[in-house]
Image (tube, coloured by chain):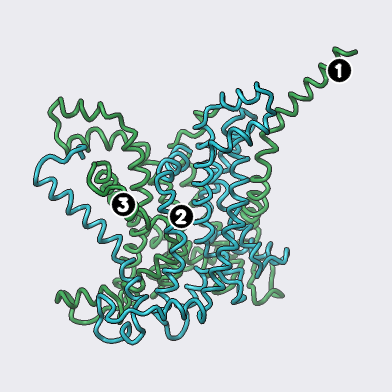
Amino acid sequence: MNPKVKHGISRTFFYIALLLFLIFIIIPIYWCIVTSFKHSAEITSSVVTYWPKQFTVENYINAWLQSGFEIYFRNSLFISVIGVVFIVVISVLSGYALARFKFKGKNVYMLILLCTQFIPGAMLLTPMFLIFKNLGLLNNLFGIVLVDVTFHVPFNAIMMRGFISGIDYTIEEAAQIDGCSRLQAVCKVLLPILKPGIATVAAYSFISCWNEFLFTFMFISKQNLLTLPVGLKNMVGEYTINYGQLAAGAIIAVIPTLILFSFVQKNLVGGLSAGAVKG
Amino acid sequence: MRKAGTGVSMSRAAARRRAIPYVLIIPSLIFIFAFLAYPLGTIFYYSTQNYIMSKPDARAFVGLQNFVKMFSDKIFLRSLGTSAKWVLAEVISQLFLGMTLALLLDTKFKGRGLYRCIVFFPWAVSGVLTSMLWSLIYNQNIGLLNSILMDLGIITKKVAWLGNSKTVFTATVIAEIWRGIPFFAITFLAALQSIPSDLHEACVVDGGNLMQEIFYIKIPMLKDTIILTTLLRTVWEFNNVDLILTLTGGGPSYRTTTLTMYMTNTTITNGDFGYGSTLAVAAFIILLLFAIIYLKLSGFGKEQES
């Protein structure tokens, strides 16, 4: 498209296309929100209403207190926060090594990081189950943290490499000439400049941990240790599905990602393309 | 004496400096080897076992028997076709729609920032949540889709979109497209914005129109990005399991059972670790071929010399 759309006809097509994308993206979210605010009688009545006749928050209250979403939320938060701390620290270490050093085996290391992106979690279900069983990590939230860290460090390390490479090394050098050790130069000079990169990696890895499903589904069977995705999935498996609570639970689960996403989406565009495409 | 001492400490310092990058990458390597590489290696071993979770006493070495079983397993053979169909449908539609969206977003218009934030959001939504959102649309009784189609007079009887073997595949594909468009749009938009603006000016000077600019300048400039994102997405969609598992569970009558889905059901639902691992080995070999193509095309390792 030209920076300015000139002709009337192409402008009309342009806005129609924009509108179609918007409708397609928004409808599922809209419908979930609308359903979550309806009384259960209105949801199951034979006439489907496009807007709640009577607003109610009972689905949210029941999902939170009765269906266990308070516990799921707490478990998801616990796993994600600890996972993010590990992922960010390890990614900064690896990213720094990749961005600032030339060393033997660097290409092999990069190759290993890239290859991990091809391995599906589903492939590792059996061996991981048996390893975790031996380590006593089944039905253990730390076990899920280990899985999250393993699966998300490689991509975030590559992304971090991109952010660190984007910062001029001469700034660190100048600090070292001024009498700082290398470590001090990193902590006092590099890390403050790297903050947006760290925030992006933290948000990205938080969303990844928050969304983890498959291993929790297989490894956690205790109700009080479940996370939001598995809690939602189990609700569908019940004999009668309470759609209002399901919709409310989905909205509860999506809110933290929505906040983080709107916060970092600008950085993400550059970071992701640098990490994912250029490798 | 003194000189020699300095020399030793110098070379020691140099050795220490050389060791720094290795120390820095060790934590990541520990995780990768303990919980990715090692378990990956053991699937080859488990694939030669008769190993069912509920019958640990019956565990035995069976050689290649699982592989023989696999090649005569109709569900497996069908799952290969379903995987191919799934990957093609997803990648082609996501590529086309993502490219269109990126081209639209490369144009200035009022409210572009907010618009971008909304249309990119599904990227952050998990497979499980996506299937929750779409199951509320597809639901036979309370779903939005049946209601709209009936109000418009297009259908007269409510359709069970996910229970009907004719519609379930397309319905699942659409739900995943919803989540997949932003990935392409985000990467293409970043690439489009790095195209120098004098190319656009040159095109205008030469009398080129909009379509010519898109097809002769923009898309050729995006060639590398297109190849890499497409291959990356091919692998991800091949591996996709969260969404299919929660939306359809692979059914009805195996219509949405991709190879990865079949592997997951065999391992989790049936607890058949031996045969599940055999299927994992099959998936591994297929993915290895993808990976080789990917690394070849990306010209990996040319930029970073050690």
Q: Earlier in the sequence, mark 1 or mark 3?
A: 1
| Rendered shade, chain A | cyan
Q: Is residue B136 left or right of residue B288?
A: left
Which quadrant of the structure image shows residue B269? bottom right
**Other residues around mark 1 within 10 Å, as few (<14) / some (14–19) / many (≥20):** few
**Residue B151 picture location, percent across and down:** 17, 77
Q: Give the amino acid at mark 1.
A: Gly
Res. B5 mark: 1
Question: At numbered mark 3, what does the secondary structure look like: helix, strand or loop?
Answer: helix
Question: At numbered mark 1, what does the secondary structure look like: helix, strand or loop?
Answer: helix
Cα gap from disc 3 to disc 2, whole angstroms: 15 Å
Does A51 sit above or below residue A210?
below
Q: Give the amino acid at mark 2.
A: Leu
Does A127 sit above or below residue B223?
below
Image mark 3: chain: B
Image mark 2: chain: A
Res. A172 mark: none
- Quadrant of the rendering where the N terminus of chain A is positioned: top left
Disc 3 and disc 2 on one polypeptide chain: no
Res. A260 mark: 2
State the residue at coordinates (22%, 57%): A20
Task: Tell me if residue A144 can be seen.
Answer: yes
State the residue at coordinates (30%, 60%): A25
| Rendered shade, chain B | green
Does B186 sit above or below residue A174?
below
Cα gap from disc 1 to disc 3, whole angstroms: 65 Å
Question: At numbered mark 2, what does the secondary structure look like: helix, strand or loop?
Answer: helix
Residue receiving disc 3 = B114
**Residue B210 picture location, percent across and down:** 16, 37
**Residue A144 picture location, percent across and down:** 61, 62
**Other residues around mark 2 within 10 Å, as few (<14) / some (14–19) / many (≥20):** some
State the residue at coordinates (42%, 76%): A246
